[in-house]
Image (cartoon, rainbow, N blue to C red):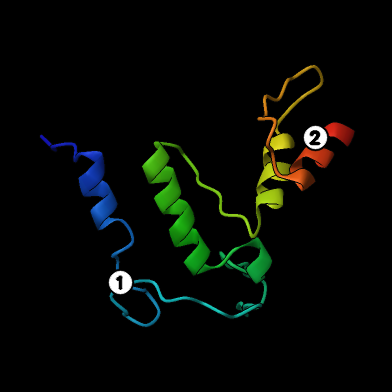
Amino acid sequence: MTKKLRSATQLVHQGIDRDPTTGAATVPVYLASTYHHEQGRPGQFDYARSGNPSRQQVEDAIALLEGGVRGFAYSSGMAAIGGALALLGSGDHVIAPDDLYGGSHRYLSTV
Protein backbone atom coordinates (compact mmCIF):
# COMPACT_ATOMS: atom_id res chain seq x y z
CA MET A 1 0.00 0.00 0.00
CA THR A 2 1.44 3.35 -1.05
CA LYS A 3 0.71 6.28 1.25
CA LYS A 4 -0.44 9.43 -0.57
CA LEU A 5 1.74 12.35 0.39
CA ARG A 6 0.10 15.57 1.52
CA SER A 7 0.35 18.59 -0.79
CA ALA A 8 2.91 20.36 1.41
CA THR A 9 5.20 17.32 1.33
CA GLN A 10 4.87 17.00 -2.43
CA LEU A 11 5.70 20.69 -2.90
CA VAL A 12 8.77 20.51 -0.68
CA HIS A 13 10.14 17.64 -2.75
CA GLN A 14 9.09 18.95 -6.18
CA GLY A 15 11.98 19.85 -8.43
CA ILE A 16 14.77 18.18 -6.49
CA ASP A 17 15.47 15.47 -9.03
CA ARG A 18 19.01 15.49 -10.33
CA ASP A 19 19.58 17.12 -13.68
CA PRO A 20 19.96 14.18 -16.11
CA THR A 21 22.62 15.95 -18.18
CA THR A 22 24.89 17.43 -15.53
CA GLY A 23 23.96 15.61 -12.34
CA ALA A 24 23.21 18.95 -10.63
CA ALA A 25 21.13 18.56 -7.46
CA THR A 26 18.40 20.76 -8.97
CA VAL A 27 17.58 21.76 -12.51
CA PRO A 28 19.78 24.75 -13.36
CA VAL A 29 18.55 27.89 -15.10
CA TYR A 30 19.00 27.17 -18.80
CA LEU A 31 19.76 30.24 -20.89
CA ALA A 32 20.15 28.47 -24.25
CA SER A 33 17.81 29.73 -26.96
CA THR A 34 18.06 26.73 -29.31
CA TYR A 35 18.79 23.04 -28.89
CA HIS A 36 20.51 20.55 -31.20
CA HIS A 37 19.10 17.07 -31.81
CA GLU A 38 20.31 13.89 -33.40
CA GLN A 39 19.44 13.94 -37.08
CA GLY A 40 15.87 12.89 -37.68
CA ARG A 41 15.04 12.62 -33.97
CA PRO A 42 13.01 15.36 -32.33
CA GLY A 43 13.93 16.32 -28.79
CA GLN A 44 11.79 17.52 -25.92
CA PHE A 45 13.02 21.10 -26.37
CA ASP A 46 13.82 22.93 -29.59
CA TYR A 47 13.50 26.67 -28.96
CA ALA A 48 13.50 28.51 -25.63
CA ARG A 49 10.29 30.44 -26.30
CA SER A 50 8.37 27.19 -26.59
CA GLY A 51 9.97 25.68 -23.49
CA ASN A 52 13.18 24.68 -21.73
CA PRO A 53 14.09 22.51 -18.72
CA SER A 54 13.95 25.45 -16.28
CA ARG A 55 10.49 26.49 -17.42
CA GLN A 56 9.31 22.88 -17.38
CA GLN A 57 10.29 22.67 -13.70
CA VAL A 58 8.23 25.78 -12.87
CA GLU A 59 5.24 24.51 -14.86
CA ASP A 60 5.40 21.13 -13.10
CA ALA A 61 5.39 22.94 -9.74
CA ILE A 62 2.35 25.03 -10.76
CA ALA A 63 0.46 21.90 -11.82
CA LEU A 64 1.29 20.22 -8.51
CA LEU A 65 0.33 23.30 -6.49
CA GLU A 66 -2.99 23.71 -8.31
CA GLY A 67 -3.77 19.98 -8.51
CA GLY A 68 -3.86 20.17 -12.29
CA VAL A 69 -2.60 18.02 -15.11
CA ARG A 70 -0.43 20.83 -16.55
CA GLY A 71 0.87 24.17 -15.41
CA PHE A 72 1.77 27.08 -17.65
CA ALA A 73 4.35 29.84 -17.21
CA TYR A 74 4.14 32.98 -19.32
CA SER A 75 6.60 35.79 -19.89
CA SER A 76 4.03 38.47 -19.03
CA GLY A 77 0.59 38.95 -17.56
CA MET A 78 -0.81 39.92 -20.94
CA ALA A 79 0.51 36.67 -22.42
CA ALA A 80 -1.22 34.76 -19.62
CA ILE A 81 -4.47 36.63 -20.26
CA GLY A 82 -4.22 35.88 -23.98
CA GLY A 83 -3.67 32.19 -23.21
CA ALA A 84 -6.67 32.07 -20.90
CA LEU A 85 -8.92 33.94 -23.33
CA ALA A 86 -7.95 31.56 -26.13
CA LEU A 87 -9.82 28.86 -24.20
CA LEU A 88 -13.10 30.77 -24.34
CA GLY A 89 -15.74 30.13 -26.93
CA SER A 90 -18.52 32.18 -28.45
CA GLY A 91 -21.00 33.25 -25.79
CA ASP A 92 -18.62 32.70 -22.86
CA HIS A 93 -18.29 35.45 -20.26
CA VAL A 94 -15.36 37.02 -18.41
CA ILE A 95 -15.71 38.65 -15.01
CA ALA A 96 -13.04 41.28 -14.30
CA PRO A 97 -12.66 43.95 -11.60
CA ASP A 98 -13.19 47.67 -12.25
CA ASP A 99 -9.59 48.48 -11.31
CA LEU A 100 -8.13 46.08 -13.88
CA TYR A 101 -4.77 46.92 -15.48
CA GLY A 102 -5.41 49.33 -18.39
CA GLY A 103 -3.88 47.09 -21.05
CA SER A 104 -6.01 44.17 -19.93
CA HIS A 105 -9.12 46.36 -19.83
CA ARG A 106 -8.54 47.60 -23.39
CA TYR A 107 -7.88 44.04 -24.58
CA LEU A 108 -11.06 42.72 -22.99
CA SER A 109 -13.08 45.68 -24.27
CA THR A 110 -12.02 45.34 -27.90
CA VAL A 111 -11.72 41.60 -28.47
Location of residue 21 by image quarter: bottom left
Q: Is residue 100 visible?
A: yes
In the image, 95 versus 13, the foreground residue is 95
According to the picture, the residue beneath numbered tag 1 turns out to be: 18
**Dot 1: few (<14), some (14–19), or many (≥20) neighbours within 10 Å?**
few
Q: Position of residue 45 (x, y in %)?
A: 59, 67
Tag 2, which secondary structure?
Answer: helix
Q: Position of residue 54 (x, y in %)?
A: 48, 68
Amino acid at the residue labelled 2: Leu
Q: Residue at 50%, 43% (x, y): give it.
A: 70
Looking at the image, residue 33 sits to the left or right of residue 110; the answer is: left
Q: Is residue 90 above or below residue 2?
A: above
Give the number of the disc on residue 83: none
Q: Quadrant of residue 31 in the image?
A: bottom right
Residue denoted by label 2: 108
Q: In screen coordinates, is 61 left or right of 84? A: left
Q: Inspect this view and state whether residue 111 appears.
A: no
Q: Is residue 2 above or below residue 54?
A: above
Q: Which element is circle 1 on?
A: loop
The residue at the point 74 percent across, 19 percent down is 92
Q: Residue at x 74, y 37 (%)?
A: 86
Quadrant placement of the N terminus: top left
